Image (cartoon, helix red, strand yellow):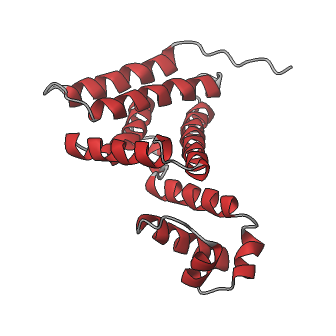
Amino acid sequence: MGTRERILAATTEMIREGAERLSVRAVAARAGIGASTLRHYFPTQRDLLNASLTATYDEAMPDERIRDTTVPPRERLRECLQRLLEPFGGPDAARDVWLSIFEAFAGPDATPEARAGYEVLEDQAARRVGAWLAILEEEGVLAPGDTRRRTQLLLTVVDGLSIARALPRRTTHLEDEAATLARTVDAVFDVPFPARATP
């Protein structure tokens, strides 16, 4: 493992352990390097946090399924979107996850750094979904179009479904959720999203 990877691994471990503050000295000590070496790779604390959140997101959301051409393209995209909901789990887990997300990123005690961290996670989600759409376009199974608008539609639906998981619901909620995702994927494939002309 190279120095950069060791730094990211140390940062990720500390995040998972619930470290309230990721000081340069603490991360450097965990990685077994000096603070100046860490600063060489990540000049600011924000650079370090952004890179570690990106690495964590990439590890949690691998892309292999979207490339499996033995599965129909709509089903591949639906399954990938379904994976975005996995961290929310069942009703009790979903409520706990949403409470922790709100408290960490949007609650009254959320710091500007925490809010900026949430923006990184949002950017990573959009990057990942946009990459899935680009793969399908390259295969020729999805008509070229405005990837940003398609991504926004898909993530808006996923956000809504993740909130719905935390609320009281009917016994058919999983079937309803799958049907909603399938209809949204159909919209991405069937409704024209003309690419915007560049000025």
**Quadrant location, the C terminus:** top right
Please state the horizontal and vertical placement of residue 66, each as a whole percent of the image. 47, 42
**Quadrant location, the N terminus:** bottom right
Furthest-left residue in this view: 171
Location of residue 146 with respect to 133 vertically, above or below: above
Please tell me which residue is depicted at 57% across the width and 78% down the height of the picture. Answer: 26
**Quadrant location of residue 174?**
top left
Location of residue 78 with respect to 103 vertically, above or below: above
Please tell me which residue is depicted at 65% across the width and 85% down the height of the picture. Answer: 33
Please state the horizontal and vertical placement of residue 107, each as a whole percent of the image. 45, 42
Please tell me which residue is depicted at 45% across the width and 32% down the height of the picture. Answer: 73
**Quadrant location of residue 102?**
top left
Please state the horizontal and vertical placement of residue 58, each as a whole percent of the image. 52, 55
Q: How many marks?
A: 0
Furthest-top residue in this view: 191
Q: Is residue 145 visible?
A: yes
Q: Tell me: 179 left or right of 29.
A: left
Q: Tell me: 178 left or right of 105.
A: left
Q: Is residue 142 visible?
A: no
* 32 or 24: nearer the viewer: 24
Please state the horizontal and vertical placement of residue 84, each as a whole percent of the image. 41, 42
Please tell me which residue is depicted at 70% across the width and 19% down the height of the picture. Answer: 195
Furthest-right residue in this view: 199
Q: Tell me: 26 left or right of 36.
A: left
Location of residue 160 with respect to 62 vertically, above or below: above
